Amino acid sequence: NFGVLLAAAASGDIDAVQLLQRMAEVTMGRGGQSGGVATFVSSPTDPTAVKAVRARVLPGRRQAMAPLLGMDKQRRGVPGRIVNMSSLGGKIGAPYLAPYVASKHALEGWSESLRRELLMFGIDVVVVGPGAIATPIWQKAESLNVAQYAHTAYAPFLIRYHEALMRTGVHGLPASRVADLVMHIMTTRRPRTRYMLAPNPLLNWWLPRLLPTRWVDRLVARAYGLPSTIQ
């Protein structure tokens, strides 16, 4: 039972943690993580986009897992931990990935609220925000059909963005790095509330987070050849 396994791992069972680590490596290797790669939309009201956000955000395991992790006081053991897998997109917006970025921002907010709701039970909530991970998900991105946007204003820029996505996948971190980090979170005494894991963290994380937002807007526009009329 996955719920029992996760509860055991969160309570410090090293065998359970190592099994979960192997499961994570296998799952990530099959193309997990970053399921919203290149969800191109030309309208924020696109019904496909709205459906994608709902599918990625709405949590379906809270009621089932919380008693196993410590809300049920009749159970013995140390309260567990919840690790929610976010993304760089949970903090940094990228063009053409609005549904994916919106879902990850929502997950970050939900995780923060949930962590504070569960303080009284001793259950911790930790967020992991990886950047590009080298998995078969990038093979799916190769098959994306950008021709459907040929008659939109975005057409010439989507091709360039698509090519950039392919390069990103090639230089992604191995899935084992994420699995190792999750194991650390499950076993360390006092984990941080959020972890960032990304190739080239200076460029992909620190500069976008520290530079003025308008500067980042202009840098993104320049990187993808996007025209900008905002000064």
Image: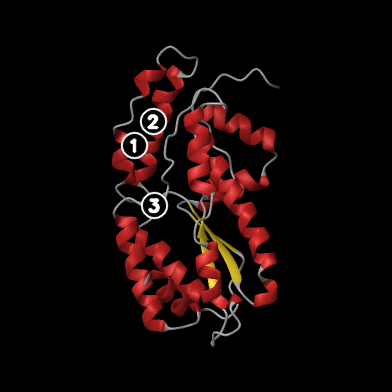
Which residue is more in the foreground, 80 or 203? Answer: 80
Given the current orientation, which residue lies at the most extreme bottom position? 76
- Where does label 3 land, which residue? 133
At horizontal 46% and vertical 67% (from top left) the residue drawn is 181
Could you classify mark 2 by the number of other residues whose Cα lies within 10 Å: few (under 14), some (14-19), or many (20 or more)? Answer: many
Left/right placement of residue 138 relative to residue 83 reads left
Q: Picture coordinates of residue 65 (x, y %)?
A: 51, 68
Tag 3, which secondary structure?
A: loop
Q: Picture coordinates of residue 112 (x, y %)?
A: 65, 59
**For residue 58, above or below residue 181:** above
Rendering quarter of residue 161: top left
- Where does label 1 land, which residue? 141
Tag 2, which secondary structure?
A: helix
Q: Are marks 2 and 1 in contact (CB under 8 Å)?
A: yes
Could you tell me if residue 218 is visible in this image? yes
Left/right placement of residue 102 relative to residue 200 reads right
Q: Nearer the viewer, mark 2 or mark 1?
A: 1
Could you classify mark 1 by the number of other residues whose Cα lies within 10 Å: few (under 14), some (14-19), or many (20 or more)? Answer: some
Looking at the picture, the colour scheme in use is secondary structure
Query: The disc labelled 3 sits on which kind of residue?
Result: Ile
Query: The disc labelled 1 sits on which kind of residue?
Result: Ala
- Number of numbered markers: 3
Q: Which mark is residue 195?
A: none
Query: The disc labelled 2 sits on which kind of residue?
Result: His
Q: Picture coordinates of residue 53 (x, y %)?
A: 52, 40
Distance in Å between CA atoms under marks 1 and 3: 13 Å
Quadrant into which the N terminus falls: bottom left
At horizontal 50% and vertical 33% (from top left) the residue drawn is 49
